[in-house]
Amino acid sequence: QVQLVESGGGLVQPGGSLRLSCAASGSIFSIYVMGWYRQAPGKQRELVARIDSGGSTNYADSVKGRFTISRDNAKNPVYLQMNSLKPEDTAVYYCNLYPPISSSWGQGTQVTVSS
């Protein structure tokens, strides 16, 4: 079973940056495709970015060019660098495998973009 803990969220002004971290434990982390997801109020959870074990990445169109997903297989975390943040990026951000495992959803970390 993979256990995931997200951190790094907060309140930031439009145009600002945040770096989210996801710590994983409980399994062989490095072989998995990992993803960052987000859920805004009243909306379904959506995939923001994913990265495979070799470092290949894929992004949602809404964040392409602004967000960067990366991973450190030796130390387990997965990161999401978010630049040029917009109010519509406001959401709870989660990490999980891709495709996600329902039992591995963590508490998420809140990102609020507001002036």
Image (cartoon, grey):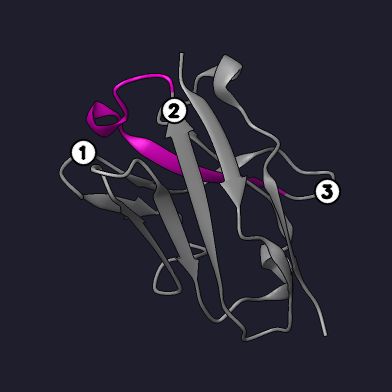
- Comparing 80 with 26, the one in front is 26
In the image, which is nearer the foreground, mark 2 or mark 1?
A: 2
Q: At numbered mark 3, what does the secondary structure look like: helix, strand or loop?
A: loop
Is residue 53 shown left or right of residue 85?
A: left
Q: Secondary structure at mark 2?
A: strand
Give the distance between the C-alpha atoms of the residues marked 3 and 1, in whole angstroms: 31 Å
Residue matched to label 2: 25
User: Does 94 appear above or below 91?
Assistant: above
Mark 2 or 3, nearer chain start: 2
Numbered range of the magenta stretch? 26-39
Which comes sooner in the sequence, label 2 or label 1? Answer: 2
Using a 10 Å C-alpha cutoff, classify the residue at mark 3 as few (fewer than 14 neighbours), some (14 to 19) or many (20 or more): few
Query: Residue 27: x percent and y percent?
Result: 36, 19
Label 2 amino acid?
Ser
- The crowd level at tag 1 (other Cα within 10 Å; few <14, some 14-19, many 20+) is some
13 drawn magenta = no
Residue indicated by mark 3: 41
- The kind of residue on which mark 1 rests is Ser
Which of the image's four quarters has the C terminus?
bottom right
Provide the residue designation for mark 1: 53
**Horizontal side, residue 10 vs residue 28: left or right:** right
Percent position of residue 69, x then y: 38, 57
